[in-house]
Image (cartoon, grey):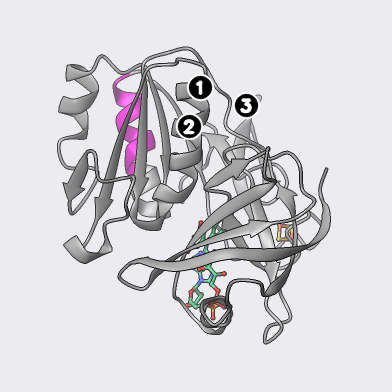
């Protein structure tokens, strides 16, 4: 259930250039891939959203991967094992797990929810193939290093889809990359889900700060990334 939690940092470590893995234990007892938590950083008024990159129900431990951006993520970096952390979650919808030939695409830190999705699909014995793209070699994140594309995940995407007989794509990363993936999926008549990112204020569907335009039943409607998303069908997003 979504609520405010106080968690304890179980571990925090530098896993790639300017990128950290943080494990948090708390009373949160259920989370799914695609969902995110919004962390209160005392030096910032607005909570900062981060995808859940793993969740272990037995130990009630969730993992987030974060890339340093500004003061909020600098604060997170300053935390240590045992530090307390306040967060709201789990927020948003989740990836629909479908028994197809799945391609998971993580561009940059967009790999974070894909690692959790890969785990959920694999637990259900759903065939999946993960590709990730990082600008620099020292940005590559462990666990995503199976099929790293040096540079853009878009390079060679059509060939991979054909070769692996993919019929469902899940993607997360910068909007410009998601837009292109959604276009490729549409051209190749493949189903596609994208996990969108927007700067968020409330994270609970109230402020309308994170709305995007969606195609619904022949009309264009507004949907919030934090509440209606972050996962949308690639075909329903109005790509601006
Ligand atoms: C649903 C969701 C899931 C996310 N998951 C992750 C994740 O797993 N790992 C991760 O590292 N980051 C993730 N982000 C982005 C993360 O929330 C921001 O990087 C973080 O809030 C930056 O906080 P800051 O105080 O350090 O930087 P700020 O000082 O707030 O921002 C620094 C710069 O980054 C830009 N920025 C801030 N937030 C965003 C955003 N959401 N999208 C694009 N640009 C932004 C600002 O405009 C500014 O230019 C996610 C965002 C969303 C909406
Ligand atoms: S962040 Fe307020 S509605 Fe999404």
Tell us which disc is closer to us: 3 or 2.
Answer: 2
Q: Which mark is residue 119?
A: 2
CA–CA distance in space, label 2 to label 1: 6 Å
Q: Residue at x 78, y 63 (%)?
A: 207
Q: Where is the N terminus found, in terms of image quarters?
A: top right
Query: Residue at label 1?
Result: 123
Q: Residues within 10 Å of mark 1 (few under 14, many from 20)?
A: few
Secondary structure category for the residue under label 2: helix
Residue toward you, 141 or 188: 141
Q: Residue at x 62, y 26 (%)?
A: 218
Give, as a single range, the part of the protein colored magenta.
180-188
Q: Give the quarter the ligand 2 occupies.
A: bottom right
| 106 in relation to 4, above or below | above
Query: Residue at label 3?
Result: 218
Q: Residue at x 40, y 57 (%)?
A: 109
Secondary structure category for the residue under label 3: loop
Mark sitting earlier along the chain (3/2): 2
| 79 in relation to 110, above or below | below
């Amino acid at each position: 259930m979504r609520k405010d939690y106080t968690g304890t940092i179980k571990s925090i470590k530098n896993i790639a250039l300017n990128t950290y893995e943080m494990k948090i234990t708390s009373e949160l007892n259920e989370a799914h891939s695609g969902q995110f938590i919004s962390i209160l950083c005392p030096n910032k008024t607005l909570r900062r959203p981060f995808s859940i990159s793993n969740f272990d129900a037995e130990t009630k431990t969730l993992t987030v991967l974060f890339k340093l951006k500004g003061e909020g993520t600098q604060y997170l970096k300053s935390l240590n094992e045992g530090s307390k952390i306040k967060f709201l979650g789990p927020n948003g919808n989740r990836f629909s797990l479908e028994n197809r030939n799945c391609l998971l695409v993580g561009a940059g830190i967009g790999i974070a929810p894909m690692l959790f999705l890969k785990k959920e699909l694999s637990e259900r014995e759903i065939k999946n193939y993960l590709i990730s793209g990082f600008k620099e070699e020292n940005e590559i994140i462990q666990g995503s290093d199976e099929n790293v594309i040096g540079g853009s995940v878009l390079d060679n995407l059509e060939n991979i889809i054909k070769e692996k007989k993919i019929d469902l794509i899940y993607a997360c990363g910068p909007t410009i990359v998601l837009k292109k993936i959604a276009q490729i999926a549409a051209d190749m008549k493949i189903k596609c889900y994208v996990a969108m990112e927007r700067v968020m204020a409330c994270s609970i569907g109230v402020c309308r700060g994170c709305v995007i335009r969606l195609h619904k039943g022949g009309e264009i409607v507004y949907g919030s990334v934090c509440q209606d998303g972050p996962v949308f069908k690639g075909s329903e997003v109005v790509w601006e």
